[in-house]
Image (cartoon, grey):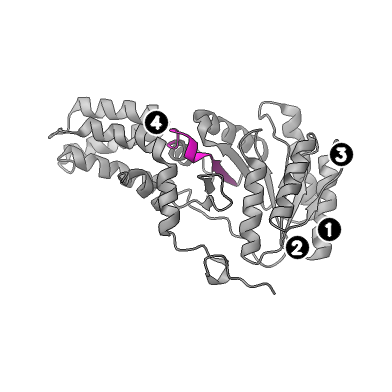
């Protein structure tokens, strides 16, 4: 049995301490553009303010909407603040920021559910998303994390529409030293998945990660293909796919929410990966996704490095967002 010790020396494949100083610093750096667009603007708004006023709430509302936190979160937060002000619990403008921080943690905590791979059989992860979100790279990074935990893993190239997609996944399979099941370009994706499940069973593989084509969520025929893949998986292995993971690009802001809603309506998403948080001022979209969708956020991506895809933790995220830049 492979060792269950990961790179950070933790037994049983558990994550390193959540407040790992090195990662927290990278997370903080990665959220710098979002911090500038949200927290810095809030700081400037409340600077010198001694009392809570209606104008202050209106300015805050505009900042939150602009930062892509969404109307539902903004309305609830502002109403909570107004209520606290009436009850004399919000006596100065600086306290306002702490209330906002706590409210974010409360909302995000509902989506704070790591992906757990049971060790009692074959576990299948179907990964979906539109082109350009970093889907294949995300698959490679997850495979790397699983193998470091001692979980035998297999990759499946079910995006048969683009030769480059198969080649990219093959590069990742070699990089993280896991087998790849593939067929030639143009093959039936469901047939590739069928072969993969049977190969995984015969090899007693513990986790299978399936790459699918970069679907345009508005194209009904392509969504139907994803449904077909799910049907084949469920027929060949009870409960499969056990996880249907949607990869969305944080830089697209509100469009990420639209994609999540459409994919969820079509194929029932069970988890979300939010990539490219380090390249956007729209990181507040994490809060909107958590508020408007009942789907766990499994991972966030804050850089190009193989270790820059990390399990999402609400408190770490909010603390990194609000902590002042040195």
Q: Earlier in the sequence, mark 3 or mark 1?
A: 3
Q: CA distance from mark 3 to mark 1?
A: 17 Å
Q: Earlier in the sequence, mark 3 or mark 2?
A: 3
Residue 37 x %, y %: 36, 32
Report which residue position mark 1 lands on.
199
Badge 1 vs badge 4, beta-carbon distance below 8 Å: no
Residue 231, relative to residue 219: is it above or below? below
Badge 1 vs badge 2, beta-carbon distance below 8 Å: yes
Report which residue position mark 2 lands on.
205
Residue 29, relative to residue 218: is it above or below? below
Badge 3 vs badge 1, beta-carbon distance below 8 Å: no
Q: CA distance from mark 1 to mark 4?
A: 46 Å
Q: Earlier in the sequence, mark 3 or mark 4?
A: 4
Report which residue position mark 4 lands on.
67
Q: Earlier in the sequence, mark 1 or mark 2?
A: 1
Quarter of the image that includes the N terminus: bottom right
């Amino acid at each position: 049995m492979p060792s269950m010790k990961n790179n950070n020396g933790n037994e049983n494949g558990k994550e390193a301490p959540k407040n790992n100083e090195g990662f927290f610093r990278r997370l903080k750096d990665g959220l710098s553009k979002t911090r500038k667009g949200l927290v810095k603007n809030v700081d400037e708004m409340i600077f010198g303010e001694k009392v809570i006023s209606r104008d202050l709430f209106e300015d805050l509302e505009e900042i939150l909407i602009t930062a892509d936190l969404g109307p539902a979160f903004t309305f609830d937060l502002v109403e909570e603040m107004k209520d606290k002000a009436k009850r004399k619990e919000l006596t100065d403008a600086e306290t306002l920021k702490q209330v906002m921080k706590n409210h974010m943690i409360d909302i995000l905590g509902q989506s704070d559910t790591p992906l757990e791979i049971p060790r009692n059989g074959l576990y299948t992860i179907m990964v979906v998303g539109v082109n350009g979100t970093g889907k294949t790279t995300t698959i490679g990074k997850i495979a790397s994390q699983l193998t470091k935990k001692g979980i035998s893993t297999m990759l499946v190239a079910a995006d048969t529409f683009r030769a480059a997609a198969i080649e990219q996944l093959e590069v990742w399979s070699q990089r993280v030293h896991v087998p790849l099941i593939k067929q030639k370009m143009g093959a039936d994706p469901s047939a590739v998945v069928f072969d993969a499940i049977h190969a995984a069973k015969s090899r007693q593989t513990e986790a299978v990660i399936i790459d699918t084509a970069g679907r345009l969520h508005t194209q009904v025929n392509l969504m139907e293909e994803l449904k077909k893949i799910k049907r084949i998986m469920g027929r060949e292995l009870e409960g499969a796919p056990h996880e249907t993971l949607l990869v969305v690009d944080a830089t697209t802001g509100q469009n990420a929410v639209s994609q999540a809603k459409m994919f969820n309506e079509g194929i029932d998403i069970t988890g979300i990966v939010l990539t490219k948080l380090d390249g956007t001022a729209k990181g507040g979209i994490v809060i909107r996704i958590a508020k408007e969708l009942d789907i766990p956020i499994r991972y966030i991506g804050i850089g190009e490095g193989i270790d820059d895809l990390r399990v999402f933790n609400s408190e770490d995220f909010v603390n990194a967002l609000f902590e002042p830049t040195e």
